[in-house]
Image (spheres, rainbow, N blue to C red):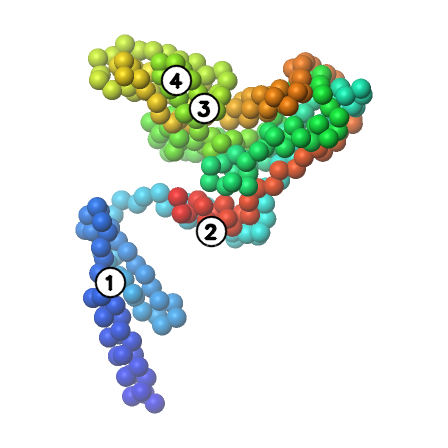
C-alpha cells in the first residue's frame, strides 16, 4: 500500500515537473525577474507554476482583493444596492408641490460604462414622473447622501492621483464612474460637471499639466495648450453631475423644475427604485479591471 502511494506521489511530481517545463513563465512586455506567480492545485496539493516566490517585490493594486474578500464575507453575493427616488409633497393639476429626492447609498455603478443595465437612470426618473402626471416640480432635485456620511479620501492616497480618473473616491452619490472628459481651452466637460473652476498658470513646459487638490473644484492648468488638450479626470463631487443630468433629462421630457424652496412635507412617494448589479458581479468587474 505504501509503495503504491509512493509511486502515485512520484507520478504526480513528474506530471507537475512536466507541466512546469511545458508552461514556463512567459509574460510579454514584463521583466519576469520582477514578476512572481504561484498557481497551486488544491486537489492534488502540488504547484503548477512556482516562479520567483523568494523575491521581494513592490506590490501593485492588491488591496482590491481584501475589499472583495471582506464584502463577500459580510454580505451575500446576490445582494444589490437599492437607490430610492422619492417625490415629496402632493401632486395637483400636474404640479408636484415638493421635491424630487434621490436617496443615495454608495452604489458605485449608476450609469457606469462597465454595466449596461445601469444606464438610463435619469430617463427612468422622468418616465416615473410622467406616469404620475407631473409636468412641473415646484421644488428642486435633491441628491441626499446622508446614508453614506463617510465619503473621505483614504489615508495614504497619493496627492498626484487625486485629479485623475483612477484617483476617484467612493462617495454617497457615484455617477458615471465619477469621471469626466475635459477639453481645453474650451473648458468643455462630458458629462457636465457644474461649478468647476480653472486657474491657469504660466509655464514654459511643452506639455499640459492639470492638478486639483483634494476636495477642491479648481483645476490648476499649466503648459502650452496651442494644440489643444483632452483627458479624463475624477469628479470632485459626482452628486452635482448626477443632479445636472437629471435636470437636463427632465427638461427634455417637458417637465419644468422651478429649483425653488418648499416646506418639508409628510407626504412622500417612492417613484423609482434603481437596482444595481449583484454584489458578486460588481466585485468580478473590480477584480478583472
Q: Which mark is residue 219?
A: 4
Counting residues from the start of the chain, the first of labels 1 and 4 encountered is 1
In the picture, which quadrant includes the N terminus?
bottom left
Q: Left of 110 or right of it: where is 169?
A: left
The residue where tag 1 is placed is: 23
Q: Nearer the viewer, mark 1 or mark 3?
A: 3
User: Element at badge 3?
Assistant: strand
Q: Residue at the spot x=62%, y=38% of the render?
A: 274
Q: Considering only order in the chain, which callout, 2 or 4, is on the residue closer to the N terminus?
A: 2
Q: Give the spatial CA distance, label 2 vs label 1.
A: 29 Å
Label 2 SS: helix
Cα gap from disc 1 to disc 4, whole angstroms: 49 Å
| Residue count near mark 3 (Cα–Cα under 10 Å), binned few <14, some 14–19, many ≥20 | few
Q: Which badge, 3 or 4, comes first in the chain's sequence?
A: 3
Q: Give the quadrant of the C terminus.
A: top left
* Residue 176 position in % (x across, y down): 49, 32
Query: Residue 229 in the image: x percent, y percent?
Result: 32, 20
The CA span between labels 4 and 2 is 36 Å
The numbered disc on residue 190 is: 3
Q: CA distance from mark 3 to mark 4?
A: 15 Å
Camera-side mark, 3 or 4 = 3
Q: Residues within 10 Å of mark 4 (few under 14, many from 20)?
A: some
Left or right of residue 93: residue 34: left
The residues bearing labels 2 and 3 have C-alpha atoms spaced at a distance of 34 Å
| Label 2 Cα crowd, 10 Å radius (few <14 / some 14-19 / many 20+) | few
Q: Say which residue label 2 marks.
A: 69
For the residues labelled 1 and 3, the Cα–Cα distance comes to: 46 Å
Amino acid at each position: 500500500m505504501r509503495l503504491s502511494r509512493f509511486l502515485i506521489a512520484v507520478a504526480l511530481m513528474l506530471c507537475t515537473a512536466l507541466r512546469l517545463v511545458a508552461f514556463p513563465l512567459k509574460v510579454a512586455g514584463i521583466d519576469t525577474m520582477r514578476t512572481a506567480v504561484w498557481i497551486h492545485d488544491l486537489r492534488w496539493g502540488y504547484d503548477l507554476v512556482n516562479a520567483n516566490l523568494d523575491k521581494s517585490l513592490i506590490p501593485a493594486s492588491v488591496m482590491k482583493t481584501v475589499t472583495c474578500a471582506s464584502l463577500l464575507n459580510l454580505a451575500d453575493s446576490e445582494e444589490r444596492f437599492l437607490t430610492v427616488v422619492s417625490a415629496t409633497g402632493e401632486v395637483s393639476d400636474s404640479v408636484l408641490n415638493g421635491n424630487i429626492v434621490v436617496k443615495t447609498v454608495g452604489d458605485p455603478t449608476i450609469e457606469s460604462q462597465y454595466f449596461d443595465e445601469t444606464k438610463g437612470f435619469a430617463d427612468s426618473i422622468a418616465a416615473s414622473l410622467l406616469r404620475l402626471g407631473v409636468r412641473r416640480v415646484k421644488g428642486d432635485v435633491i441628491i441626499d447622501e446622508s446614508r453614506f456620511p463617510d465619503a473621505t479620501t483614504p489615508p495614504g492616497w497619493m496627492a498626484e492621483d487625486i485629479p485623475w480618473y483612477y484617483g476617484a473616491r467612493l462617495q454617497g452619490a457615484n455617477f458615471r464612474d465619477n469621471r469626466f472628459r475635459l477639453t481645453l481651452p474650451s473648458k468643455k466637460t462630458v458629462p457636465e460637471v457644474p461649478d468647476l473652476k480653472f486657474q491657469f498658470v504660466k509655464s514654459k513646459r511643452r506639455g499640459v499639466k492639470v492638478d486639483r487638490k483634494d476636495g477642491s473644484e479648481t483645476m490648476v492648468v499649466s503648459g502650452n495648450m496651442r494644440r489643444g488638450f483632452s483627458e479624463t479626470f475624477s469628479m470632485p463631487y459626482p452628486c452635482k453631475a448626477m443632479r445636472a443630468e437629471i435636470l437636463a433629462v427632465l427638461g427634455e421630457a417637458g417637465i419644468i423644475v422651478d429649483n425653488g424652496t418648499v416646506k418639508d412635507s409628510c407626504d412622500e412617494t417612492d417613484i423609482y427604485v434603481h437596482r444595481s448589479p449583484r454584489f458578486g458581479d460588481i466585485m468580478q468587474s473590480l477584480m478583472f479591471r
